[in-house]
Image (cartoon, rainbow, N blue to C red):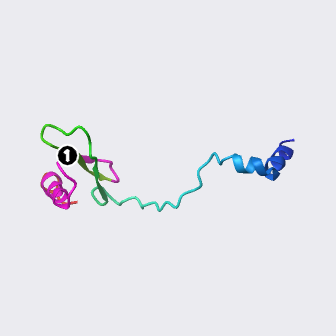
Amino acid sequence: MITDIRNHLNSCLPCAQNNHRRQKLPGALKPIKPPEGIWKLLSMDFHGPIAPTSKQGNRYIISLTDILSKFVVAKAVRDCSATTAVKFLINDVILKYGTP
């Protein structure tokens, strides 16, 4: 009986037009290989703009994540420019934890 119902639904044109897929199609993900050790593969990203701004005028959060250990270094910053990212990387990551 189940096969009869499936055959009817597959052959019914209005059923095929109105019934949407309930599952997403598989995406074209390209997984990254796990790093061999900590500080071997890092991910850095800006989050924001966040409203309301802080008292210091910060509207964004920059974060650096170690992929293997999931250790996160985050800081609130005013803008999302390359100079801000370099200053964060040097002052808040390299000078505190060493070079990745």
Residue where numbered disc 1 is placed: 75
**Which region shows up in magenta?**
67-93
Q: Amino acid at mark 1?
A: Lys
65 relative to 30, above or below: above
Give residue 21's position: percent from left, percent from top: 65, 48
Q: Quadrant of the C terminus?
A: bottom left
Crowding near the residue tagged with mark 1, few <14, some 14–19, many ≥20 C-alpha atoms within 10 Å: few
- The residue at the point 29 percent across, 51 percent down is 65
Q: Secondary structure at mark 1?
A: strand
Please give left or right for residue 90 compared with residue 72 in the image.
left
Give residue 84's position: percent from left, percent from top: 17, 56
- The residue at the point 16 percent across, 60 percent down is 83
Give residue 20's position: percent from left, percent from top: 66, 47
Does the magenta portion include 72? yes
Give residue 57's position: percent from left, percent from top: 14, 43
Viewer-proximal residue, 15 or 28?
Answer: 15
Viewer-proximal residue, 23 or 49?
Answer: 49
